[in-house]
Image (tube, helix red, strand yellow):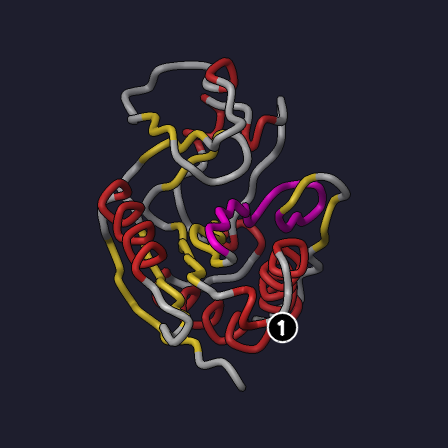
Amino acid sequence: MSHPLLLRRIGRADYESTWQAMREFTARRTPDTPDELWLVEHPPVFTLGQAGRREHVLADIGIPVIPIDRGGQVTYHGPGQVLAYVLLDLKRRGYGVKALVHRLEQAVIELLAARGVAGERLPGAPGVYVGGAKVAALGLRIRNGCSYHGLALNVDLDLSPFRSINPCGHEGLAVTRLLDLGIGLDWNAAAEALAGRLAETL
């Protein structure tokens, strides 16, 4: 690879401190700063993107709702979900945000395909779906040609908090997880498998 991608296995970490760390990394990076991929798992939290509308949070179930600076609407993060945060210099890599979204989706599609599951894209709804149910969500921020935030892959998390929101702003959107698709990876194995695919597609 002409542009190295440093892997940071952060593991369980608070959402807000991780978000702040991504912003600080992006703000201080130089043209020579290596790109990084962070693998993280968060305690339960709803995040509301820049275009997010509060009415998509349907009920207060005691999980904090944090307005943040990525694109998109509301989603849920929690234990059993792999967050792959992509801190990339897109100008240096020579592709833009649409290509980045495609490459992130492709990594998940390939991870699923290697285990006999057909993932797909849906027009106008970034992410990866299986049978119409969302298994991976995307949300990005680009600052000075560099990306942060990234991809959330549902491994074996409790899906019930999704019933308290319109996931990604879509009423009644079904969500799924690797466990329910017959893919019995634990968090660490799923994180490593996803990181390997991302290293190829990015």
- Residue that appears at 55% across and 24% down: 166
Q: Nearer the viewer, residue 149 or 180?
A: 149
The x and y percentages for residue 12 are 24, 54
Q: Nearer the viewer, residue 124 or 188?
A: 124
The x and y percentages for residue 66 are 34, 29
Tag 1: Cα neighbours inside 10 Å, few (<14), some, or many (≥20)?
A: few
Q: Nearer the viewer, residue 156 or 166?
A: 166
Please tell me whether residue 132 is drawn above or below residue 167 in the rendered image: below
- Residue that appears at 46% across and 50% down: 143
The x and y percentages for residue 62 are 27, 21
Give SS at disc 1.
loop
Q: Which residues are magenta?
A: 127-144
Residue type of the residue flagged with mark 1: Ala
Provide the residue designation for mark 1. Answer: 114
State whether residue 57 appears in this view.
yes
The x and y percentages for residue 58 are 47, 15
Horizontal relation, residue 178 to residue 103: left or right: left
Q: Residue furthest right?
A: 123
Q: Nearer the viewer, residue 6 or 26?
A: 26
